[in-house]
Image (cartoon, grey):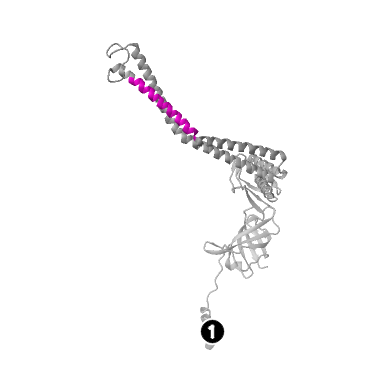
Amino acid sequence: MKKLVLGIMILALLVGCSQAGQKPTPTATPGATTKKTSGSGASAQGYVTPIRRADLAFRSGGRVVEVLVKEGDAVKAGQPLVKLQDTELKAALALAQADLKGLQKGARAEEIAQAEANLKVAQAQVESAQAELAKLQAGVLAAQVAAVQADVARSAAELKVAQDGYDALVLGPGHGVQDDVGAPGRGLGQYEENKRARLAALKASYDAAQRRLTEARANVGDTTQSAQAGVDIATAQRDATQARLNLIKVGTTPQQIEAAKARVAQMQASLDEAVLLAPLDGTVAELDIQAGESASPGVRVASLADLTQWQVETDDLSEVDVVGVQPGADVSVTVDALPGVTLKGKVTSITPRSAVKRGDVTYTVKVAIVEPDSRLKWGMTAFVEMRDK
């Protein structure tokens, strides 16, 4: 009996030692995760967005005259949404079209005749200006200056004779020939006043002649320069008129017509761009402009989306997880706003280039929802469980 008890004790001791050499099995602690990996794929978080959507803006700015839709309206591709003021654009298009039409018609006989008549008038103006300049250069101005100089000399001589006579009358012998009124000192009376008045008149005449001479000399250079400028202007006008006649006679070239057509196309494009058109069938999701406001070039005024086709965009798939996912892979989609609902989807694209977010290398994945729920909304939070194709 003692041997049996001793054997049991030894066996118990051996079992206890064996258990003491093993590590205890850990107990799983429940916790929330947004992404996990497995050998066959990965899961990630993203947001529900329309597959087809567009932010709309005007290429050129302008004042809004009419907003034709409101948020929530269903529209068709090509439907006008917003209009800008287009009065000036229409006028520019009409002018370009008129120029093109004139070039395509070509020159008419009456246009050539009118251009030739204009050239004759321009040539006559050149000849007249040249004649005037030649007259001045031939000495007409010099003759005019000489005539004024003669007036100055004559006035100076008359003034000297009058001054000498007056001095002799008033100052006595030794200052000129004595007048017949007798010796100085006697009462001169009216005779002296007449002499003095005549002397003053001759002095004024002499001063006026001197001013005319100064002006004539100054005008010689100015008049010649003005005449030369008149010749230059008339010649330039004649040459331009001749060039115009040459163009009319040659007729319109193909290059001119093509350039005119390009201007018409440009003006038409600018006019078309004054109306914002829907690029796709969809719903006006956002509208940021009103009539009377100014639209700036390139600044979004509306957002449009097809709300019948949805996808999930996720950008938190790591470099470790992305290798297990390929385009075309089946996906299970759950949405926080739709508890208990699992939607089917397929991976449509994976960005070739990574982005670093919070220190992690990640890739953006787009998942198309195959059978979307009618309750889906733009921006809802979604979780996708991706599997290899």
Please state the extent of the stretch shown in magenta in the rendering: 139-164
**67 magenta-colored:** no
25 sits to left or right of 310: left
Q: Is residue 24 above or below residue 190?
A: below
Q: Position of residue 216 (x, y in %)?
A: 45, 31
- Position of residue 208 in the picture relative to residue 18 (left or right): left
Please provide percent x and percent y for residue 175: 29, 20
| Residue nearer the viewer, 329 or 184 | 184
**Residue shown at 53%/85% (left/top)?**
5
Residue 377 in view (yes/no): no
x then y, percent, for residue 148? 44, 28
Toward the viewer: 183 or 146?
183
Which secondary structure is most common in the magenta stretch? helix
The amino acid type found where label 1 is placed reads Leu
Image vertical order of residue 207 relative to residue 11, above or below: above
Q: Quadrant of residue 11?
A: bottom right
* Rendered image quadrant of residue 349: bottom right
The residue pinned by badge 1 equals 11
Q: Which quarter of the figure has residue 382?
A: bottom right
Q: Is residue 173 left or right of residue 289?
A: left
Question: Does 162 appear in magenta?
Answer: yes
What SS does tag 1 mark? helix
